[in-house]
């Protein structure tokens, strides 16, 4: 009871002291906030930028560090980012072939042009600016960072 009163008198914010506060890592060019998977007991730093957008003069070159102009973006990882994916038209036949072998094909019919009209729709999260990675960190490891032996990544 006394402790609670002291906190309130000091203007202490109870919510900020709550154990559920999510960590924010300062990467220099952005402040990145993790989410916590409670049942898995790990922090999920998702969709972390690690390179400048590989567009324009940077297209097809090695990744270069993200630029900073003094403005740090806040990123809570919720914006999904995916590089463009290519799914061959024959993908639809592979499960059939794995299960049924050559019975999956009508061999006497010869080559059949795949049904390209059935090509899957583009992923709305796909973008050329896709130099992002995900880092999962066990909560216990994150909270003892710098105090022990570290952990393999
Ligand atoms: C959280 O972790 C549990 C245990 O590892 C896992 O089964 C579950 O899929 C995870 N939840 C999400 C949203 O990834
Ligand atoms: C600074 O960088 C941020 C993030 O890349 C960008 O949104 C903003 O437009 C930049 N501002 C200037 C003045 O270049
Ligand atoms: C990490 O967070 C992202 C964004 O919320 C989510 O899509 C992804 O499933 C999460 N991964 C794990 C392993 O929890
Ligand atoms: C394997 O062949 C059976 C009979 O033609 C078919 O019903 C089934 O869908 C095939 N399996 C796959 C994975 O396509
Ligand atoms: C296989 O292809 C041949 C030649 O087009 C056709 O006559 C035959 O009916 C086909 N068989 C099956 C099971 O679709």
Image (spheres, rainbow, N blue to C red):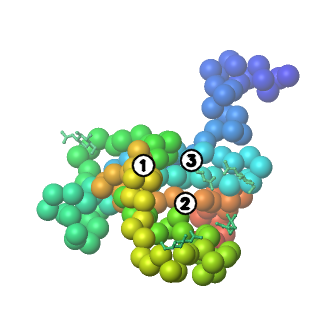
Asked which quadrant contains residue 101, the reply is bottom right
Residue 82 showing in the rendered view: no
Question: Going from the N terminus, do you reach mark 2 or mark 3 first?
Answer: 3
Question: For the residues carrying marks 3 and 1, which lies nearer the camera in this image?
Answer: 1
User: Badge 1 is on which residue?
Assistant: 121
Q: Residue at x 42, y 65 (%)?
A: 114
Q: Tell me the quarter of the image containing the C terminus.
A: bottom right
Which residue is at the far right? 1
Front residue of this view, candidates 102 and 35:
102
- Left or right: 152 in relation to 27: right
- Left or right: 80 in relation to 146: left
Q: Residue at x 79, y 27 (%)?
A: 3
Asked which quadrant contains residue 142, the reply is bottom right
| Residues at discs 2 and 1 in contact (Cβ within 8 Å) | no
Q: Residue at x 41, y 40 (%)?
A: 74
User: Badge 3 is on which residue?
Assistant: 34
Measure the C-alpha gap from mark 3 to mark 1: 30 Å
Q: Secondary structure at mark 3?
A: loop
Q: Which mark is residue 65?
A: none
Measure the C-alpha gap from mark 2 to mark 1: 28 Å
Q: Position of residue 123 (x, y in %)?
A: 43, 49
User: Badge 2 is on which residue?
Assistant: 135
Q: Position of residue 65 (x, y in %)?
A: 29, 62
Question: Going from the N terminus, do you reach mark 2 or mark 1 first?
Answer: 1
Front residue of this view, candidates 33 and 109:
109
Q: Quadrant of ligand 2?
A: top left
Q: Is mark 2 within 8 Å of ligand 3?
A: no
Crowding around mark 1 (Cα neighbors within 10 Å: few <14, some 14 to 19, many 20+) is few
Measure the C-alpha gap from mark 2 to mark 3: 9 Å
């Amino acid at each position: 009871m006394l402790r609670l009163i002291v906190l309130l008198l000091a203007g202490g914010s109870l919510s900020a002291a709550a154990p559920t506060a999510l960590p924010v890592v300062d990467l220099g060019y952005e402040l990145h906030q993790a989410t916590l998977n409670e049942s898995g007991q790990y922090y999920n730093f998702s969709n972390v930028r690690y390179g400048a957008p590989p567009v324009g003069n940077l297209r097809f070159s090695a990744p270069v560090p993200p630029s900073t102009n003094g403005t740090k973006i806040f990123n809570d990882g919720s914006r999904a980012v995916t590089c463009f994916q290519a799914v061959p038209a024959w993908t639809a036949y592979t499960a059939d072939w794995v299960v049924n072998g050559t019975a999956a094909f009508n061999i006497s019919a010869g080559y059949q042009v795949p049904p390209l009209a059935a090509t899957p729709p583009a992923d709305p999260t796909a973008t050329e600016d896709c130099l992002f990675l995900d880092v999962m960190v066990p909560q216990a490891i994150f909270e003892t960072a710098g105090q022990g032996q570290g952990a393999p990544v």
